[in-house]
Image (spheres, rainbow, N blue to C red):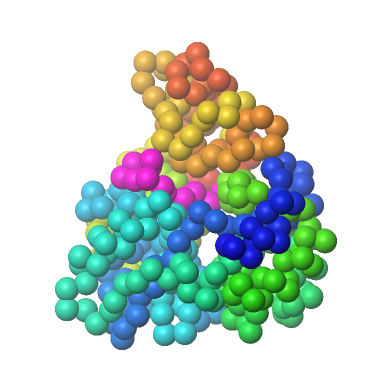
Amino acid sequence: MSSWNELLAPKAQSLTTTQLAVGFVAPIADQGLIALDGEESSHFLHGQLTNDVEHLGSDEARLAAYCSPKGRMLASFLMWRSGSSILLQLPLEIQAAIQKRLSMFVLRAKTKLSDASALPAHQVVIGLGGGLAEAVLQNWFEPLPARPYAKLEHPLGTLIRVADAFGAPRYQWLMSAEVAQTVLPELALRLAVGDAHAWQLSAIHAGVPQIGKATQEQFVPQMVNFELLGGVNFKKGCYPGQEIVARSQYLGKLKRRTTLVTINDSAAIAGSEVYATADPEQPCGMIVNTAPNGRGGVDALVEMKLAAIEAASVRLGSASGPELAFHSMPYVLDALDL
């Protein structure tokens, strides 16, 4: 991210959701990339992840989870093809451990895992969104990816449209340092320049969770709405934890979902427990992701019991802790009663 640090870091600021909705550009600095190369990469990953990898097209990206044998999420990925490689994007803090764990199961499969984070094509990774972003990007890309999780390979880099937020598209742009020197100044002239938390805040308002070190092995994918986001394919073959994930879907034994809240306490972090005032003796859920909201607190995705979401009387840390203010999600939490 050296080009970002040289060109835009001095202009970066904490952005509010109002500013994000208008139009922003921000670094994506906390994500790493694992590359899989080899003729059996698709087949290998298809047997490890919750989503279909073998039919992953060159013009799309997909969400996927990597689960323990108990069906609990060890990692969540955004994955796509780049030439002959398959790339998995995930938090840097767990990349090395997940890469090592996946490598243990390669056995005789013709695939090799490597760290692709610092490759020239990925030297700078930025996020863009809000109402102005589409028009700004049309300076370089025409046409733009037409739907969420569509991908475009271009001489100026890889552009992936991800889940919308604030009623507008969001995009990731992976580029070389040379390209960044040209495009970043233009972007800064036309969009609000956010700090490293701005992209995280936009993802929270898109309702897209991400598993980090604090929340590994805490959630079955449906608890964090992952199948609603297209991150689980229930028609594909087996993968670690598949039986439990499928049972949760079809037998409806879970009664938990993830929702969007504001907490007026900057100390709220992923992995913190929350308590319903109606049942103060035990936690009703856990924070999945947080980001500063530019108003002194955080906005967060919080997994909790459906009854607690419906009652909307939940506190951080204890039943007498800071209050959670509930907001509508950008998609419907369906009636699976998970």
The image shows residue 333 at horizontal and vertical percentages of 53, 45
Q: Is residue 40 above or below residue 160?
A: below
> Is residue 100 one of those drawn in magenta?
no
- Name the residue at the front extreme: 6
Q: Is residue 61 above or below residue 299?
A: below
Q: Quadrant of the N terminus?
A: bottom right
Q: Is residue 280 visible?
A: yes
The image shows residue 230 at horizontal and vertical percentages of 48, 61
Identify which residue is drawn at 66% across, 29% down: 296
The image shows residue 275 at horizontal and vertical percentages of 45, 22
Q: Quadrant of the C terminus?
A: top left
Q: How many marks?
A: 0
- Name the residue at the left extreme: 108
- Name the residue at the top extreme: 320
Identify which residue is drawn at 45% across, 61% down: 32
- Name the residue at the right extreme: 189
Q: What range is drawn magenta here? A: 207-219
Q: Is residue 131 visible?
A: no
Residue 41 sits in quarter: bottom left
The majority secondary structure of the magenta stretch comes to loop
Viewer-nearest residue: 268 or 229: 268
200 lies left or right of 43: right
> Is residue 218 one of those drawn in magenta?
yes
Identify which residue is drawn at 37% across, 45% down: 213
Viewer-nearest residue: 132 or 198: 198
Q: Is residue 214 above or below residue 56?
A: above
Identify which residue is drawn at 66% across, 76% down: 179
The image shows residue 113 at horizontal and vertical percentages of 31, 72
Q: Is residue 58 above or below residue 229?
A: below
281 lies left or right of 259: left
